[in-house]
Amino acid sequence: MIKIHFAKLSFVPLFLQRFGYLGAVQKINQFLKENIISAYQIKISEIHLHCDVQGYTFSVLDFYRIKSRSRNNRYYNDDNSSTDSFYQNGRKFQGFMRGGGDYLMRVYNKTKEIKKFPNKSFIETLWKTNPHYDSSKEVFRIEFQLRREKLKNMVINDEVLDGFEVILNNLNNIWSRCLEDFSLRDFDDKNTLEIMLGYKTAKDGSKFPLESETVRKRFQRSEIHPLWHTIKTFNGHVKTDVIETFKKPFTTDFLYVHNAFKAFLSTTLSHYGNVLPSTICDAMNKVEEYTNFKHERTVIQDVYSKRLDRFNRLDRFNRLEILGKDDEILYEQKHTFVNRVFDHIEQSYDHMYHCDVAYDSNDYFIKKFQKFLGEAV
C-alpha cells in the first residue's frame, strides 16, 4: 500500500469558536468527501488546548510555582519580542512559557494581546456568554501545545495518541495530563521568592543558599494550587483514563555504551580522586554491596533482569506500531538475542562470582529468565 500525503489543514481559532471543534471537523470532512476525495486517513500533527481565566492575575512568581521537568522556559513582556529576563525598565510582565519543542505550556495576558491585535477580539464574544465575566478585569490564557512527536509517544488503553478519533475522544484526558506535567503549586510568596532568588534570609539578615534538594522537597510536599482544581475539567468532561508515556526500551548504538562507560569513570574520579585499578575494584564492590542491600540480588542478576524487562516491552511497541529503527532491528532478532544471553549466563556467573557451580536451578533470576525464554521461543 502506498501512502500519499494529500493535504495539511489548519483550523483557525475563529472557525473553531463558531462551530466548536467537533462541528468544525465534521464540516471539513463533509467538504472533502463531497468535493475532493472520498476515502482518506487523518493524522493530527499538532493540537492546542487552552483555558481562559479571570479573577487570578498571574505574576512573575507563578513562573516559579510551576512544577515541571522542562528547563526550556521564557518570560513574556510588553515588547513584541520575548526575553528570558523581566528585569527591564518600562516593561510589564505579560506571561511565561514552560517547556518547548513538541510539548509546552504558555500563560499570557489575553486582554493585552487583544488590545495589541484587535483582529483577535472575536473571543470576547464567547467570554460575554459567561455571567461572571467582568469586562473591566484582565483575562489570562493557559495554553498547552502538543505536536505529533509527543502525541505518538503517549498511550491510553493500549492505543497510541496518533489517530484522529482517539485524540478527539481523549481531549479531557490529554488536558488532565498537561495539568499534571505543568502543575501550579500552592506556595506563598515568601517560599516562592526564596525559590526564585536561590537563597533564604535569616532574621539577622544573613543569607543561606537554597539547595536543589531543599527546593525538590518543597515541591514534593506542596499542594496543587486551587486554580488548577478549578480548571481540571475540559469542556465539562473530567479525567476518565490515565495517559502513559513510553520511551524506547534501548538502542543498539554503541555510542550509548561509550557514554555510559565514560560516565562511570568520570563519577568514580570525582568520588575517589583517581581511577586506579584498585579504585575501580573498590567501586565495583560497593556497587555489588548496594545492589544486594537494595534489591536483594547480585549486580549481574539485576542487570539481566532489567534488560529483559525492557526488551519484553518490544512486543507491546510492535503491537502499537511505534517501534523505532533500533527497536525494529532488535525485534527482528529477538530469538537470537534471547538465546545469546542465555548462553552467556553460565559464563557470566562463573567469571563474575568464581562459582564452581554456575547457578542454582532455584535462583530467582534463572526462574524469571527461563519463563521469559519459554514465552519468547
Image (tube, helix red, strand yellow):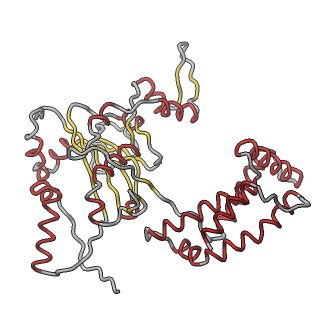
Q: Is residue 296 left or right of residue 143?
A: right
Which quadrant would the N terminus be assigned to in this image?
bottom left
204 and 68: which is toward the camera: 68
Residue at figure coordinates x 32%, y 50% from the top left: 173
Does 257 sit above or below residue 188? below
Hey, which residue is sitting farthest right in the picture? 356
Q: Quadrant of residue 7?
A: bottom left
Name the spot of residue 127 as percent of width and height, x first: 12, 42
Rendered location of residue 207, percent (x, y) = 56, 23
Residue drawn where x is 65% and y is 63% of the image: 371
Question: Compared with residue 326, is residue 191 higher up or lower down, i.e. above or below?
Answer: above
Q: Is residue 338 above or below residue 238?
A: below
| Residue displayed at 51% across by 60% down | 247
Camera-nearest residue between 108 and 295: 295
User: Seen in the image, is 208 located left or right of residue 175?
Assistant: right
Q: How many marks?
A: 0
Residue 5 image position (x, y, % from top left): 29, 79
Position of residue 167 in the picture relative to residue 35 (left or right): right
- Tell me: 277 left or right of 11: right
Residue occupying image coordinates x 70% and y 57%: 303
Residue 348 is situated, as x and y percent measured from the top left of the image, at 81, 64
Residue 188 against residue 372 in the figure, above or below = above
